[in-house]
Image (cartoon, rainbow, N blue to C red):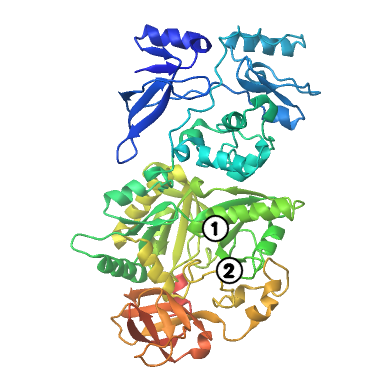
Amino acid sequence: MLAPVMRAGAHGPLIEALRGRGVPVWTGHGVTGTDGDAGGVLTAAHVAPIDAHGSPFGPARRIECDLLAVSGGWNPNLHLYSQAGGRTSWSDDVAAFVPGTAVDGHRPVGAANGTFDLAEAIAEGEAAGHETPRPRARPVASGTGPATLWLVEPGPGQEDQVFVDAHRDATLRDLRRAVGAGMRSSEHVKRYTTIGTGADQGRTSGVSGAGVLAATLGRPVGELGTTTYRPPATPISFALLAGRDRGQLLDPVRRTPIHDWHEANGAVFEDVGQWKRPWSYPRPGEDLDAAVLRECRAAREGVAMMDVSTLGKIDLQGPDVGVLLDRIYTNTFSSLAVGHCRYGVMCRPDGMIFDDGVTARLTADRYHLTTTTGNAAAVLDWLDEWLQTEWPDLRVHPTSVTDQWAAVAVVGPRARDVVRVLAPDLDVSAEAFPFMTVREATLRTADGGLPARIFRISFTGELSYEINVPAWHGLALWEAVHAAGAPHGITPYGTEAMHVLRAEKGFIIVGQDTDGTVTPADAGLGWAVSKAKHFIGERSFQRADTARAGRKQLVGLLPADPDTVIAEGAQLVAGIPPPIPAAMLGHVTSSYRSAALGRSFALGLLAGGLDRRGETLFAVSDGQAHPVVVVEPVFYDKEGARRDG
């Protein structure tokens, strides 16, 4: 370990502590460069004598190391002071901007006032509490204050390797380009280079950026000042400052409370947003196709179970929730009875489908809203945006509870038998617990009674119960369902089987069967659009293009060869190839092999929609054209007779 410092006096206690541990301390030195391996991992640092302007003037030594610690000293947190109208000033004593002008009703003390000695900070705080005037800690003796070295001058062509703002990847070259373009103000340079606009809002780069700019212009840093501190003053965690977007840290991985069970039981996972979701559970000797067919068959003929914990969940409370949902959804929710559920569709202002899901009314002023897995954050943001900017008068409090609930879907003709064992005190008959209702129950588990919220909703068309419990009981719930269903041969199924089951019923997946140009009417959801109220996107339905005939709409497709699974994304064209016609009429959005149908099938968006029913088109992919017949998008149980078991 080696400690190069510019001035020993500014770090006296630290220097003595390092020397006491046998660490060499070189004053007047700085790190002039580093080496790394092919993976970007630090292997060595170059240390050389540096003058007051940051220019090396002696030979550099290469020192092998795997850690380089950099300290830029302390800076007072000036956000609240500045937002209260205070003007900062530069202090050579602490080499930082400190509170300058006095502000009525606002008195910075301690570190916020540039007093970094612990004893002095405590005394200053006590004095402020007793309203006793106390001068700032005595000035640091000349020549012993912190050195203000803003940068180590890089070698030729290396300005883009000197990072002024690590959050924005803004470099010395960016700053000097701004100066070359005529920028002289910190505010202008901030906007030209984005320095100080990252997640830390300038906490790690604001002062150093001002200092480098001052050094470049040859002006005192105090003359330039800081950029404007704008509200809100939000604390920043050290974890955020230290995080690096690389490798596994590039995007957080989210796992449900049941993940370990899935992994131990052979699940193959797929990424859905940030979530790891079981794709399928292949048994020894099974490929993915065989496993999916088995899982689908279990859901249609017996009973199956699925981890649906990743679905977005938003708790809405307040007397105006019904009003909000009536404006957000295309259909009406204010009339929904307590204990009942309703499927809803959200549109953007352009009238195109944004998200869909089931919402339940738990009490008169409390609703439980579900979203698609990938849109959970976007929907919460959507609700907050409208509440804060357009309808601040509505008394509604939305809270994300996606991570607070674990959920298991019990699906199939024997699902009622399984739930009856789990919740013996709950009447699960179709009459007492009808479709699209919700009930509170106590489940029988290995650990005793477990409170649960059970929804009678279905994304497969089969009799289905979605059981929700607090997330920390998720694994206990899954194991209890698995045990209760064991006598009936209950089968876990993954997202691929779920896709097949929902597509057989013509249920859409937002983002797969929609593409930002699909209205509810295009997706066959015109029944979910109210004509008795106003909602977001309503006016756009009257636009000429939105209301015209011949729009691309959802259809079913049956390949002429029942063993051919058409590639998703295949283009739909008319005519008999070769040559393949150039005019595209639509594309395939979902395509699977079905155990229930005994053949392949697909969904697609097609110009003219069901007006082309019975026509033979061609699905073109990878230079091959497969004939397909246009049919209705509901392939299985068109009457909906199976939803009650």
- Which residue is located at x 69 percent, y 63 percent? 327
Farthest left residue in view:
285
Can residue 356 be seen here? yes
Q: Position of residue 642 (x, y in %)?
A: 44, 74
Residue 319 seen anywhere in this rendered image of the structure: no
Residue 218, percent across and down? 62, 28
Residue type for callout 1: Thr
Q: Nearer the viewer, mark 1 or mark 2?
A: 2
> In which image quadrant can residue 212 be found?
top right
Q: Residues within 10 Å of mark 2 (few under 14, many from 20)?
A: many
Position of residue 70 relative to residue 497, above or below, is above
Q: Is residue 494 left or right of residue 235?
A: left
Is 150 above or below relative to 461? Answer: above
Q: Which mark is residue 353?
A: 2
Q: Is residue 347 left or right of residue 72?
A: right
Relative height, residue 475 to residue 369 (above, below): above
**Location of residue 568 (image quadrant):** bottom left
Q: Identify the residue at image location x=79%, y=24%.
A: 103
Do callouts 1 and 2 mark residues in contact (Cβ within 8 Å)?
no
Find residue 487 and report its horizontal and vertical position in percent. Answer: 29, 59
Tell me the quarter of the picture where residue 70 sits.
Answer: top left
Q: Nearer the viewer, residue 484 or 387?
A: 387
Toward the viewer: 127 or 422?
127
Depth check, front residue: 598 or 604: 604
Q: Which numbered disc flags the more N-terminal residue, 1 or 2?
A: 2
The amino acid type found where label 2 is placed reads Ile
**Which quadrant is home to the C terminus?**
bottom left
Q: Out of 362 and 403, give the one closest to the viewer.
A: 403
- In the rendered image, the residue lying farthest to the right is 104
Q: Pinpoint residue 245: horizontal percent, then vertical percent.
A: 43, 43
Give the labeled residue for mark 1.
370
Using the numbered discs, state the Cα–Cα distance from disc 1 to disc 2 in whole angstroms. 16 Å
